[in-house]
Amino acid sequence: MTAQSTDIATYNFAYLDEQTKRMIRRAILKGIAIPGYQVPFASREMPMPYGWGTGGVQVTASIIGPDDVLKVIDQGADDTTNAVSIRAFFRKVANVAVTTETAKASIIQTRHRIPEHPLKAGQVLVYQVPIPEPLRFLEPRETETRKMHALEEYGLMHVKLYEDIARHGRIATTYAYPVKVEGRYVMDPSPTPKFDNPKMHRSPALQLFGAGREKRIYAVPPFTDVVSLDFEDHPFEVQTFDQPCALCAAENVYLDEVILDDHGSHMFVCSDTDHCEKRRADGHRGHFAPETLAPGNMEPAQ
Amino acid sequence: MTDEPLLRVSALSKFYGSRVGCENVSFDLWPGEVLAVVGESGSGKTTLLNCLSTRLLPSSGTASYRMRDGQFRELYRMSEAERRFLMRTDWGFVHQNPADGLRMTVSAGANVGERLMAVGDRHYGKIRATAVDWLSRVEIDEDRIDDEPRAFSGGMRQRLQIARNLVTGPRLVFMDEPTGGLDVSVQARLLDLLRGLVTDLGLAAIVVTHDLAVARLLSQRMMVMKDGRVVESGLTDRVLDDPRAPYTQLLVSSILQV
């Protein structure tokens, strides 16, 4: 630390002090050693409200180095408030290179999506987690849920899926779909759509999860089994979309519905903006892309 | 009946600081036998039940349970995982207040199915069929299967709690005032149902009650407790018709005659 202070406070590299980073790194290492296990850590106050990614930011701050390239996504998009702010934050306090390209990033902090572009070994995906405890809404007592994890009593998780089928005729959970990690711990994959669950299975990238308000860190090391829970007669399946992306015509990607006017017309576009832009740069065109439609000839999608 | 008891309790005591919860309780429970524990409130009945069901650890004494493989296991030496496994497979616990034993925010079907899922059942259709079967056995209409217990009357909740406990085919059921808080006609039907189920399934049960009529109807044997100690035990009919201990005589003579 520099003894002399100027008129404006200066920050340590990546905002957190070195002792805090060591504490968080210890929690991360323990999390990696016990895949899916929620490790308590002393979450710090961050210059942002809880629920805006304080857990993810602390994990990123603890693992980031000067040579890293950071990408931040919010619901798949690189250009939303949360993503832009966190990217700007790390550029300021760590002076790191930032990118929106999945393939070029070494650390990707994400809010509720896994990029469409396959991750590779050496990349780290940092999730922002609001509620790390998958059993929370079924069993409110933390003492009890910890015991249930310890004793591997996960019958209750299936009670939730049972309720879904009893009410809706199918498993209606579409996000925060519970998974079993390496055959042991049941884990909340943060509220990613269940569409992304298969991408977690044996992913070559390291996946870290930080919950700032709940003070928990957990991890899925590379090439770890991540299996979505289901019933024998109601197997796990992901969402399917009956039309491709309106802008880049991509299929088998996760789409967002975008409302176009007050009359209910809408289009479905890639939730992963980087993926969509890449495809359009490569010449792919959807039926609603500006290049497809003649100017002044806009008509709502069906 | 086999020639070995299901549960052997020896010199069980539980102290809360210097206060006595229950002291020096010993008995054997045989397969298919219903034992009633009666006494006034504060006599240590519930403490005894909680110790036996391992919800509380006793201060001293032992209890051993004959597992399905015929081996006796010391309850308080088992690991917590083993005890909890026993709790949700081979045992049942019927609470006085059904809200304590049910998940009030999930449907009746899921309440019955939870134990099945807890022991690894992963077939929705089979779980649901079992739930339907058990609801009918406890006289709950099949079309209430997707309702939450919150929408049930007190008697229905209690019957649902019984179904939830019996679905894994336990051999020993603990009941804490199973008919408490129910009106007499509902009580009568519940007792009828319980008596039928206990006989059909050959369950052993330990029923804690302050109601001597319930004890007479359900149990073959009873223990009378006072201030944490057993003052008298024997066949139910003998104890009620020919009470020997002064306290039992007082208890029996206190029954209101209608």
Image: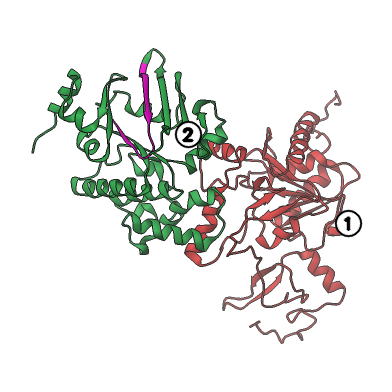
Q: Residue at x 91, y 45 (%)?
A: A67
List x then y, in percent, for residue A109: 76, 50
Task: Answer few, some or many: residues within 10 Å of disc 1's Cα (few below 14, many 20 plus, some between 14 and 19).
Answer: some
Q: Nearer the viewer, residue A203 or A298?
A: A203
Residue A130 numbered mark, or none: none
Q: Residue beneath label 1, please? A: A104
| Amino acid type at image mark 2 | Arg
In the image, the chain rendered in red is A
Q: Along the horizontal axis of the image, is B141 left or right of A109?
A: left
Q: Look at the numbered disc 1 and give the secondary structure of its residue.
A: helix
Q: Residue at x 23, y 46 (%)?
A: B187
Task: Answer few, some or many: residues within 10 Å of disc 2's Cα (few below 14, many 20 plus, some between 14 and 19).
Answer: some
Front of the two marks 2 and 1 = 2
**CA separation in Å, label 2 and label 1:** 63 Å
In the image, is residue B25 part of the stretch drawn in magenta? yes
Residue B66 numbered mark, or none: 2
Considering every residue shown, the one lying at the far right of the view is: A67
List x then y, in percent, for residue A193: 66, 60
Q: Colour of chain B?
A: green
Q: Nearer the viewer, residue A3 or B178?
A: B178
The answer to whether any part of residue A186 appears in the image is yes
Highlighted magenta segment, given as a residue range: B20-37
List x then y, in percent, for residue A3: 85, 23
Q: Is residue A91 above or below residue B27?
A: below
